[in-house]
Amino acid sequence: MAIIRRGESERGITGRRGWDPFEAMQDLMRWDPLSALSRGTRDVGQGGEFLPAFEVKETKDSYIFKADLPGVEEKDLDIALTGSRLTISGRREEEKKDEGDTYYTYERSYGGFSRSFTLPDGVDIDHVQAELKDGVLSVVTPKRAEVQSKRIELKGKGEGKVKA
């Protein structure tokens, strides 16, 4: 597939030469206005924003937060826990551009980000761990032992003992 560079004067409303109402309708039917929000802004430079994707899950003994942070270095990350609020913030720096380079598309985003999560009661804040490995940040917030769920047997089955 060849890359074709066209000037603004050659393009019509749909980004193609001329205007065809059927092509315009096809473009509109494929357009998802929310997709731009889920990917983050594409502004580059001072006003740019990098919006990493997060995953939060609960296990039997902890809450695990994972974020895709390709290109973010440890020195550019800040993880803070204030009361029950976990805040993860950082910055992905823009790569150096040479004046003579020609970009045919520029979709990677750069800039700062900050996400905050309210943790439920019972998190052991003294044993929170964080690791950045292969561009994925993992923050594990363990539950205190007294708030972890326990299975209780019925009296008819056993002697009414509590199992951990």
Image (spheres, rainbow, N blue to C red):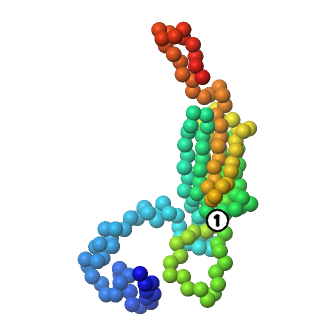
Horizontal arrangement in the rendering, residue 9 relative to residue 70 (left or right): left
Q: Is residue 55 above or below residue 83?
A: below
Where's the N terminus, which quadrant? Answer: bottom left
- Is residue 114 visible from the viewing direction of this image? no
Q: Say which of 48 and 72 sits in front.
A: 72
**What residue do we see at 33% from left, 73% from top?**
27
The residue closer to the viewer here, 70 or 119, is 70
Residue named by callout 1: 71
- The residue that appears at 56% across and 52% down in the rendered structure is 54
Q: From the viewer's perspective, is 14 left or right of 43?
A: left
Residue 13 horizontal/vertical position (percent): 35, 81
The residue at the point 60 percent across, 22 percent down is 164
Residue 92 makes an appearance in the image:
yes
131 relative to 38, above or below: above
- Identified at 61% across, 89% down, the residue is 100
Image coords of residue 102 (percent x, y): 55, 85
Say left or right for 25 vs 34: left
Is 56 above or below relative to 146? below
Quadrant of the image occupied by residue 20 = bottom left
The x and y percentages for residue 94 are 64, 72
Amino acid at dot 1:
Gly
Instruction: Provide residue 104's location: percent of width, then percent of height.
Output: 50, 81
